[in-house]
Image: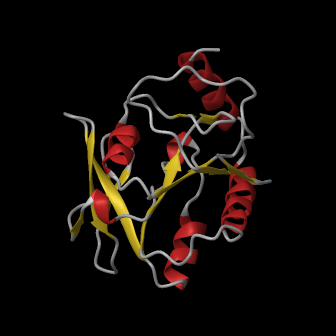
Amino acid sequence: MNKSELRKKYKSLRKALSEEQIEEYSLAIANQLLKLDIWDKSFYHIFLTIEEQKEINTDYILNILAGKDKNIIISKSNFEDYSMSHYLLTDSTTIKKNNYNIPEPVDGIEIKSSQINVVFVPLLAFDKIGNRIGYGKGFYDRFLADCKPESLKIGLSFFEVEAETFETSKDDVRIDYCVTPNRVCQF
């Protein structure tokens, strides 16, 4: 299958999930994350859930990060150049959905990509060597390319690894781990 077919397949699989399944799987993913040796870092980037896309509920991970007193970074998307700017999530951060239903900070303390230690990456599918398929605009590939090489890139997926390796382009950035409700895959 090519990327377009895989996107369609996984969007359809996600669409079939019930609210209860999404919550159960999201909690299981958060619990799997606790098994990773990643909690000694300072700056953690996380995406805020697009409920309309039936994405993983990242509130569980946000609670872990807050409980461990970590710096939580969230992003704002620029659809003109497909870039992202990153902001520290604080008690005073105002979140508003953009035209694509992506919850984003209105403003705040900007954080450079180079400061981020761990990035939790949204995805639709992943393969056995750490390639991922997102929504296809390249936001995360551009962002991850700007991070330090040692920054950990952790995909979060409701579904297990795809057996076939994906076609890739020179701009695709592989993830270091992918966490599913049942396991942690390391690449």
Reply above or below: 136 against 110. above
Relative depth, front residue between 90 and 71: 71
Query: Residue 141 or 10: which is nearer the viewer?
Result: 141
Q: In which quarter of the image is the N terminus?
A: top right
Q: Which residue lies furthest to the right in this view?
A: 182
Q: In this view, does 3 lie above or below 98?
A: above
Q: Is 69 left, or right, of 116 in this rendering? A: right
Query: What colour scheme governs how the chains and residues are painted in the rendered image of this protein?
Result: secondary structure
In the image: residue 156, left or right of residue 43: right
In the displayed structure image, the side of residue 162 where residue 2 appears, left or right = left
Could you tell me which residue is drawn at 44 percent across and 58 percent down?
150
> Does residue 105 appear in the picture of this structure?
no
How many numbered marks, from 0 up? 0
Q: In the rendered image, which quarter is residue 109 located in?
A: bottom left
Examine the rendering and report whether any part of residue 169 can be seen: yes
Query: In the rendered view, would you say 77 is above or below 1?
Result: below
Asked if residue 172 lies left or right of residue 19, the reply is left
Image coordinates for residue 113, horizontal then vertical, percent: 30, 57
Q: Which residue is drawn at 67% across and 58% down?
A: 26
Q: Which residue lies furthest to the front in this view?
A: 149
Residue at image position (40%, 25%) is: 170
Whole-percent x and y of residue 91? 34, 81
- Residue at 37 percent across and 64 percent down: it is 116
Relative to residue 53, is residue 115 depicted above or below? below
Residue 96 x %, y %: 31, 58
Q: Nearer the viewer, residue 121 or 113?
A: 113
Residue 186 percent location from the top left of the image: 67, 50
